[in-house]
Image (cartoon, rainbow, N blue to C red):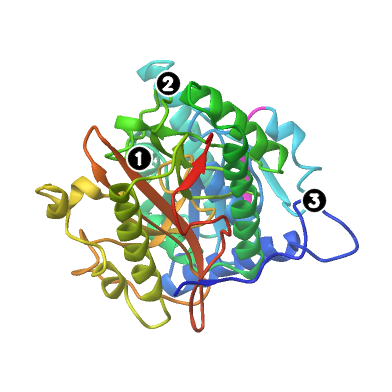
Amino acid sequence: MVKEASRLTFGPSSTDVVEGINVPRMREERAARARKEMIKRKIPVALVTGSEHVRYLVGFYWGEFVNQLSYVLFFAEGDPIVYAHAGCYQQMPDQNPWIKEWRIGRSWLGGIGGPSATAQETNKFAQEIKSELAARGLATEQLAVVDFDVAAWNALQREGLKLTDGSEWLLEAAKIKTIDEINCLKMTASIACVGYDSAVRNLRAGMTQGQISRIVTNAIGEAGAEFARGRFLSGPLSFERGVSFVDRRIEHGDLLYMPTCGTSYMGYAACLYRQFIVGRKPNGREIGWYNEMRDRIDKVIDAIRPGATTADAAKHFPPASKWGYKDEAEVLTVEIGHGVGLVNPGGRHAHYNPPVINRQWSMEHPQVFEPGMVIAVESLEGEHRVGGVRLEDMMVVTETGAEIIDFYPRDSIIVAGA
């Protein structure tokens, strides 16, 4: 039987009465983990972009409407240098007093100025990076690069810098969460679950998916989310899991599920699903689908404990052939367990972190569970163009096993609008 984690004793707002989330401590401990991993891997310096990556390392964040607007030189020893985009460069130094070194960031806006403008700007970018490294005696050392495009890599290599991909270093540093990060994720889950309660109170047949999504997203935002996300997939769109949202009208008797994936608090994003049915109780077949799926997830959760591996958990997922699929890739991100956190490789909503639990990789490439990991586990059941059911929970790995940190009901399909 799955076990719940302890619940938070404080809310999303700051107060002097209780400690709550100790933000300075969280920044310091994240940076310390990153430096420890750099030293272990003999990486003296990293050049990192991506707003969540930089936020993890130094506590600076910006709205990432274009990739690579800001970035950081992060050293295994010594103060980082933040390169901030126009506006941020002028606005943020007195807002982020813990950051001592600021420079203006160079951006070529994905190359929209044309090849010659891109070459000019990337050359300036690379020369400035080399100059800072030379000033610290690091110009001939290995430079770990995270999330930069080919134009940046080429420019840095033209300056004679020795580059290596730093993504693995950063993911490894971020896979174990500090107590404050765990509390951020608990807060995110709590806020996201407000959306499920709003769905129960407002969901009715005849609404469109867009109408109910706007209502629940507003409720999540009012609950304290930094970013609020709540969407629905209903009726014949609810199996297989789709992520191309359309404004379908919800009919009486539809199965539908709601992901709140991407809802975040202090940058820490939720990855949660709950299952609903509109206007009636579920029938025996639908109950059977849901019970089979929930029991499967429970077995995966029970297998998550320190010292066990993702292979031990993945064996409780059925093979893709169960649904008539030929390749495990056909259920990637659908039938899976994955770490969650702040570091965000690639996507800009749900933040996937190590480890990964699936039949596609885990049997041959197992990863060991460790205390402090926060993991989401999800699955589905149903029939193509008829309907289906989904569930996803988030949990923290403790010394004795996994404990769920989202507390909204999960035992059965939730009836709404009846």
Q: In x, y percent, where is residue 121?
A: 47, 27
Locate residue 65: give its quadrant: top right
Q: Nearer the viewer, mark 2 or mark 3?
A: 2
- Res. 68 mark: none
Specify few, some or many for label 1: CA neighbours under 10 Å numbering under 14, 14-19, or 20 or more: few
Q: Going by the picture, which residue comes out furthest to the right?
A: 17
Q: CA distance from mark 3 to mark 1?
A: 48 Å
Q: Quadrant of the N terminus?
A: bottom left
User: For numbered disc 3, what is the local secondary structure?
Assistant: loop
Q: Residues within 10 Å of mark 3 (few under 14, many from 20)?
A: few
Q: Nearer the viewer, residue 333 or 414?
A: 414
Tag 3: amino acid: Ser
Which region is colored magenta? 81-86
Q: Nearer the viewer, residue 50 or 323?
A: 323
The residue tagged 3 is 13
Q: Nearer the viewer, mark 3 or mark 1?
A: 3
SS for tag 1? Answer: helix
Question: Per the image, is 20 magenta?
Answer: no
* Mark 2: amino acid: Arg
Q: Nearer the viewer, mark 2 or mark 1?
A: 2
Q: Is residue 178 above or below residue 290?
A: below
Magenta run includes residue 85: yes
Q: Who's the residue at 58% across and 40% down the image?
A: 200
Residue 335 can be seen, yes or no: no
Rendering coords of residue 70 (x, y %): 57, 38
Residue under label 2, please give it.
249
Name the dominant secondary structure of the magenta segment: strand
Q: Which residue is mark 1?
A: 158
- Residue 359 in the image: state x and y as whole percent: 21, 62
Counting residues from the N terminus, which is met first, the one under dot 2 or under dot 1? 1
